[in-house]
Amino acid sequence: MNIKNMKRDSFSHSIYKMRKIFFVVAASTVVAVIASIASCSGSIPEPTPSQSVWASDKWPGTTYETLVHGRELYIAKCSGCHSLHAPSEYSERRWSAIVDTMKFKAKLNDSEAVLITKYLASAAQNNLSSSR
Protein backbone atom coordinates (compact mmCIF):
# COMPACT_ATOMS: atom_id res chain seq x y z
CA MET A 1 0.00 0.00 0.00
CA ASN A 2 1.43 3.36 -0.93
CA ILE A 3 1.24 6.60 1.07
CA LYS A 4 -1.40 8.11 -1.19
CA ASN A 5 -3.80 5.20 -0.56
CA MET A 6 -3.08 5.32 3.18
CA LYS A 7 -3.99 9.03 3.31
CA ARG A 8 -7.18 8.40 1.36
CA ASP A 9 -8.17 5.51 3.65
CA SER A 10 -7.43 7.61 6.73
CA PHE A 11 -9.51 10.50 5.35
CA SER A 12 -12.41 8.14 4.49
CA HIS A 13 -12.28 6.66 7.97
CA SER A 14 -12.39 10.16 9.51
CA ILE A 15 -15.45 11.08 7.44
CA TYR A 16 -17.11 7.83 8.46
CA LYS A 17 -16.47 8.60 12.14
CA MET A 18 -17.83 12.15 11.81
CA ARG A 19 -20.99 10.90 10.08
CA LYS A 20 -21.50 8.30 12.78
CA ILE A 21 -21.13 10.93 15.52
CA PHE A 22 -23.54 13.26 13.68
CA PHE A 23 -26.23 10.57 13.40
CA VAL A 24 -25.87 9.57 17.05
CA VAL A 25 -26.21 13.21 18.15
CA ALA A 26 -29.17 13.78 15.80
CA ALA A 27 -30.96 10.65 17.00
CA SER A 28 -30.36 11.60 20.65
CA THR A 29 -31.78 15.06 20.00
CA VAL A 30 -34.92 13.65 18.40
CA VAL A 31 -35.45 11.30 21.34
CA ALA A 32 -34.97 14.17 23.82
CA VAL A 33 -37.48 16.38 21.99
CA ILE A 34 -40.08 13.61 21.86
CA ALA A 35 -39.58 12.87 25.56
CA SER A 36 -39.91 16.56 26.39
CA ILE A 37 -43.16 16.91 24.48
CA ALA A 38 -44.53 13.74 26.04
CA SER A 39 -43.70 14.96 29.54
CA CYS A 40 -45.41 18.30 28.86
CA SER A 41 -48.60 16.67 27.69
CA GLY A 42 -48.70 14.40 30.73
CA SER A 43 -48.94 17.32 33.14
CA ILE A 44 -51.68 19.12 31.22
CA PRO A 45 -55.05 17.59 32.14
CA GLU A 46 -57.42 16.10 29.61
CA PRO A 47 -60.80 17.83 29.36
CA THR A 48 -63.52 16.39 31.55
CA PRO A 49 -67.22 15.87 30.78
CA SER A 50 -68.14 18.68 33.21
CA GLN A 51 -65.77 21.06 31.43
CA SER A 52 -67.39 20.08 28.16
CA VAL A 53 -70.87 20.89 29.54
CA TRP A 54 -69.64 24.24 30.90
CA ALA A 55 -67.98 25.10 27.56
CA SER A 56 -71.04 24.14 25.49
CA ASP A 57 -73.21 26.37 27.70
CA LYS A 58 -70.80 29.28 27.24
CA TRP A 59 -70.01 28.65 23.56
CA PRO A 60 -72.86 26.75 21.90
CA GLY A 61 -71.56 24.09 19.55
CA THR A 62 -68.42 23.46 21.63
CA THR A 63 -67.89 19.74 22.14
CA TYR A 64 -65.58 17.52 24.12
CA GLU A 65 -63.59 17.03 20.90
CA THR A 66 -63.25 20.82 20.57
CA LEU A 67 -61.63 20.95 24.00
CA VAL A 68 -59.35 17.99 23.20
CA HIS A 69 -58.21 19.74 20.03
CA GLY A 70 -57.62 22.95 22.01
CA ARG A 71 -55.47 21.01 24.49
CA GLU A 72 -53.46 19.43 21.67
CA LEU A 73 -52.86 22.84 20.11
CA TYR A 74 -51.87 24.31 23.49
CA ILE A 75 -49.27 21.59 23.96
CA ALA A 76 -47.97 21.72 20.38
CA LYS A 77 -47.88 25.48 19.87
CA CYS A 78 -47.04 26.85 23.30
CA SER A 79 -44.47 24.36 24.59
CA GLY A 80 -42.06 25.29 21.81
CA CYS A 81 -41.13 28.53 23.56
CA HIS A 82 -41.81 28.03 27.26
CA SER A 83 -42.94 25.61 29.92
CA LEU A 84 -46.66 25.05 29.88
CA HIS A 85 -48.78 26.50 32.66
CA ALA A 86 -51.49 24.40 34.24
CA PRO A 87 -54.94 25.66 33.28
CA SER A 88 -55.69 26.13 36.98
CA GLU A 89 -52.99 28.81 37.27
CA TYR A 90 -55.16 31.56 35.78
CA SER A 91 -58.80 32.54 35.58
CA GLU A 92 -60.92 32.24 32.47
CA ARG A 93 -60.59 35.99 31.83
CA ARG A 94 -56.82 35.95 32.34
CA TRP A 95 -56.35 33.00 29.97
CA SER A 96 -58.30 34.83 27.30
CA ALA A 97 -56.01 37.84 27.63
CA ILE A 98 -52.85 35.70 27.67
CA VAL A 99 -53.78 33.77 24.53
CA ASP A 100 -54.78 36.99 22.78
CA THR A 101 -51.39 38.51 23.63
CA MET A 102 -49.37 35.42 22.73
CA LYS A 103 -51.12 34.37 19.53
CA PHE A 104 -48.80 36.42 17.32
CA LYS A 105 -45.62 35.06 18.90
CA ALA A 106 -47.00 31.51 18.76
CA LYS A 107 -48.12 32.03 15.15
CA LEU A 108 -51.68 31.01 15.94
CA ASN A 109 -54.46 31.79 13.52
CA ASP A 110 -57.71 33.07 15.02
CA SER A 111 -59.44 29.68 15.09
CA GLU A 112 -56.45 28.04 16.85
CA ALA A 113 -56.41 30.83 19.44
CA VAL A 114 -60.14 30.33 20.06
CA LEU A 115 -59.72 26.56 20.51
CA ILE A 116 -56.85 27.00 22.96
CA THR A 117 -58.77 29.66 24.87
CA LYS A 118 -61.84 27.42 25.12
CA TYR A 119 -59.76 24.56 26.50
CA LEU A 120 -57.86 26.70 29.03
CA ALA A 121 -60.90 28.73 30.10
CA SER A 122 -63.07 25.66 30.61
CA ALA A 123 -60.35 23.88 32.56
CA ALA A 124 -59.75 26.98 34.71
CA GLN A 125 -63.47 27.57 35.28
CA ASN A 126 -64.11 23.96 36.17
CA ASN A 127 -61.22 24.02 38.63
CA LEU A 128 -62.57 27.18 40.29
CA SER A 129 -66.05 25.66 40.52
CA SER A 130 -64.80 22.44 42.07
CA SER A 131 -62.67 24.25 44.67
CA ARG A 132 -65.56 26.27 46.06
Image: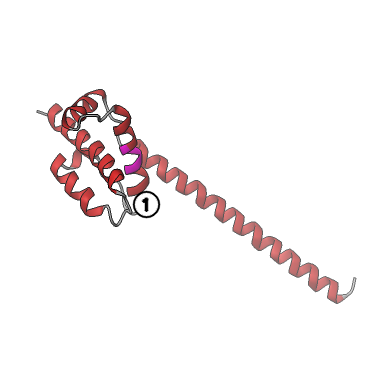
5 and 99: which one is in front? Answer: 99
Which quadrant: the C terminus?
top left
Q: Which residue sits furthest right?
A: 1
Q: Amino acid at mark 1?
A: Gly
State the SS at label 1.
loop
Number of callouts: 1
Q: Where does residue 89 sit, x and y in percent of width and height?
A: 19, 42
Q: Is residue 67 left or right of residue 22?
A: left
Q: Main secondary structure of the magenta part?
A: helix
Color style of the picture: secondary structure
Q: Which residue sits furthest bottom?
A: 3
**24 drawn magenta:** no
Q: Is residue 43 visible?
A: no
The residue lying at 74 percent from left, 64 percent from top is 13
CA neighbours of label 1 inside 10 A, class few (<14), some (14 to 19), many (20+): few
Q: Where does residue 46 sit, x and y in percent of width and height?
A: 31, 31
Q: Is residue 2 visible?
A: yes
Which quadrant: the N terminus?
bottom right
The residue lying at 46 percent from left, 44 percent from top is 34
Determine whether 49 is above or below 99 in the image.
above
Q: Is residue 53 left or right of residue 7?
A: left
98 and 32: which one is in front? Answer: 98
The residue lying at 25 percent from left, 30 percent from top is 62
Magenta-highlighted residues:
70-74
Kindly identify which residue carries mark 1.
80
Which image quadrant for residue 107? bottom left
Q: Where does residue 101 sit, x and y in percent of width and height?
A: 21, 54
**72 drawn magenta:** yes
Q: Which residue sits furthest front?
A: 61
Determine whether 22 is above or below 49 in the image.
below
